[in-house]
Image (tube, rainbow, N blue to C red):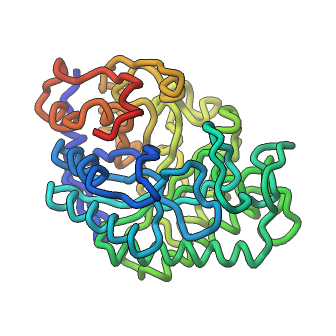
Amino acid sequence: MSKPDILFTPFKLKTLKLANRIVMAPMTRNKAPDGIPGAANADYYSKRAEGGVGLILSEGTVVDRPASRNLPHIPLFHGEAAMKGWKAVADAVHAAGGKMGPQIWHTGSTRTPDGWEPDAPVESPSGLVGPDDPRGNTMSESDIADTIAAFAKAALDAKNAGFDTFEIHGAHGYLIDQFFWPGTNLRTDRFGGKTIKERSTFAREVVTAMRAAVGPDFPIILRVSQWKQQDFTARLAYTPDEMTDWLAPLVEAGVDIIHASQRRFWEPEFPEIDGEKGLNFAGWAKKLTGAATISVGSVGLSSDFIGAFTGEASQKASLDELINRMEKGEFDLIAVGRALLSDAQWANKVKNGAYDQLEDFNASALAELA
């Protein structure tokens, strides 16, 4: 196993100062009764900070819009009770020596696996959850304006609650991503269009409003993906030029860090250009925009996360490829997901070279908040 020193070098961007390059990936837990984070949530996150993670990103937590949640116990990021709960979470992580940002979310028209339905009709760019798959209401321009305002309010609330950053969830087939995706954005107004640059208008306006709410120095992260939960093979950018048209305007609008989500971090984004060992999604995003990037995808495990939802376990795996890519500067930070669910001390064990003590991932961890 290669020495992991690169993973434990400090990182600084604007007011964000991290002790190392390891990020806890946002993972839906659906364990906030009535949408209010409590002591169990604070304990869950602070354990990972105690375990040596440099930056904790929370599970998706939703803005103040009707039907912004797609599961009943997704945490809210609005209202006095929820924000009091989140401040306690941030305080607990800071007390444990970590830094934290909430992932701010609207789930759009995504379906729910357990039959739960929100009180209000779901909303999306064109009343679709996937290509030719109608669900819910098409958003009016006033709906869109109110949603942008809700994101901006969440940004200010995150800053006021003492968080160190926040991440906008623009990936995986949820609301912002439904605007990006031609299969779910059939609009003919300024929020639609034939090109990814045109369909990014909603996201740009969200970022612009959030940046205005927090000022120039507060760091903003944006999570994006090519794949969707509705279609694992979907792509928004087939060429570097299309990726530039997609991501560069978002960076210009105020994004500091792009969290480039892919299922397996070692897979090349454009192998036809730089080969089977070429840059991954985060690597290309950094090259094309100049922004800092977070990579993610099956870090330290033998299989990707999709199988976890059908009960599939995953064994620990070598970190050599990760270390090699980070030493080359391909991306700046690495997000770790399932490995941290099963092993809150994962980062400390890696730092100390205790690879034999790393735990395999068992899907039963998805049902626990421990």
- In which image quadrant can residue 17 be found? bottom left
From the viewer's perspective, tell me whether residue 208 is left or right of residue 370: right
198 is higher (above) or lower (below) than 242: below
- The reply, left or right, for residue 233 in relation to residue 14 is right
Please say whether residue 286 is visible from this viewpoint. no
**Toward the viewer: 77 or 196?**
77
Give residue 75's position: percent from left, percent from top.
45, 57
Q: Where is residue 163 in the image (x, y as percent from the top left)?
A: 31, 67
Q: Residue at x 69, y 38 (%)?
A: 230
Q: Is residue 148 visible?
A: yes
Where, by quadrant of the figure, is residue 103 drawn?
bottom left
The quarter of the image holding the C terminus is: top left
| Front-lying residue, 197 or 209 | 209
Q: Dividing the image into 4 quarters, which one contains the N terminus?
A: top left
In the rendered view, does 58 fall on the left or right side of 48? right
Where in the figure is residue 342, as x and y percent of width and height? 30, 30
Q: Nearer the viewer, residue 191 or 369?
A: 369
Q: Could you tell me which residue is drawn at 42 percent across and 82 percent down?
A: 215
Residue at point 65% right, 33% down?
232
Q: Which residue lies at the image location 51% right of the left edge and 53% below the top edge? A: 223
Quarter of the image holding residue 206? bottom right
Percent across and percent down for residue 296 are 43, 39
